[in-house]
């Protein structure tokens, strides 16, 4: 039996989102001090706060930082666990958590992988319920927008404190967003479509 493209893509994106939650999201990078200050100066001079680089993609300084050392740093799971207060904050973890803004306001970020899995499960039936797909698409898009808004609000502080967002965060964010788009598209198509 031939699988629908939306089902395969949905499970792939949900798997990426779940995997990226356990990959490094943020790291303390004092060796990048010069590059961060230069990136901040360029951002302020060029006014790079356009919606595309702020919400749909990433700023140039963030793109360079993500590729600098992708295997180093705290994962999303570690950040949310440390921010919850159930684990001792050791080393540089408090600085990363405070600057990342993953305190009480973003502890619920742990729900995003659950929403991604729920989205993949909702795509599994031959004729998925459109209201469920639309609701999950809205929830994932709202989570992504909130996370990006919070991180954008501390962008200057992150650069000055030498905290880089790592590749795991971007994989997590973009896979959740693409899944939200897929769910929205599938919700808008006729129920009996094979996509």
Image (cartoon, rainbow, N blue to C red):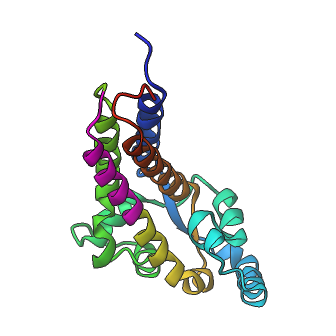
Relative image position of residue 143 (x, y in whole percent)? 37, 64
- On the question of residue 109 being in view, the answer is yes
Q: Along the horizontal axis of the image, is 24 left or right of 103? A: right
Viewer-proximal residue among 45 and 101:
45
Find out whether residue 137 is within the magenta segment.
Answer: yes
Give the farthest residue toward the front: 190
Q: Tell me the magenta residue range.
A: 127-143
Relative to 40, residue 72 above or below: above
Q: Residue at x 57, y 60 (%)?
A: 166
Q: Quadrant of the N terminus?
A: top left
Viewer-proximal residue among 21 and 137:
137
Give the farthest residue toward the left: 86
What is the magenta segment's predominant secondary structure? helix
Find out whether residue 139 is within the magenta segment.
Answer: yes
Q: Residue at x 70, y 79 (%)?
A: 36
Q: Along the horizontal axis of the image, is 73 left or right of 53? A: left
Viewer-proximal residue among 49 and 31:
49
Relative image position of residue 163 (x, y in whole percent)? 57, 74
The part of the image, by quadrant, that contains residue 101 is: bottom left
């Amino acid at each position: 039996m031939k699988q629908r493209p939306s089902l395969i893509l949905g499970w792939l994106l949900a798997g990426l989102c779940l995997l990226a939650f356990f990959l490094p999201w943020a790291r303390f990078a004092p060796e990048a001090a010069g590059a961060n200050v230069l990136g901040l100066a360029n951002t302020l001079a060029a006014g790079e706060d356009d919606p595309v680089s702020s919400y749909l993609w990433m700023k140039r300084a963030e793109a360079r930082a993500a590729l600098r050392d992708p295997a180093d740093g705290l994962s999303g799971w570690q950040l949310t666990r440390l921010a919850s207060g159930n684990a001792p904050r050791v080393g540089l973890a408090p600085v990363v958590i405070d600057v990342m803004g993953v305190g009480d306001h973003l502890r619920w970020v742990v729900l995003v992988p659950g929403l991604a899995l729920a989205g993949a499960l909702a795509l599994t039936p031959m004729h998925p319920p459109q209201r469920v797909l639309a609701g999950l698409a809205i929830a994932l898009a709202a989570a992504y927008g909130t996370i990006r808004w919070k991180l954008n609000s501390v962008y200057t502080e992150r650069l000055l404190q030498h905290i880089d967002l790592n590749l795991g965060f971007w994989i997590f964010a973009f896979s959740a967003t693409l899944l939200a788009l897929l769910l929205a598209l599938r919700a808008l198509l006729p129920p009996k479509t094979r996509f």
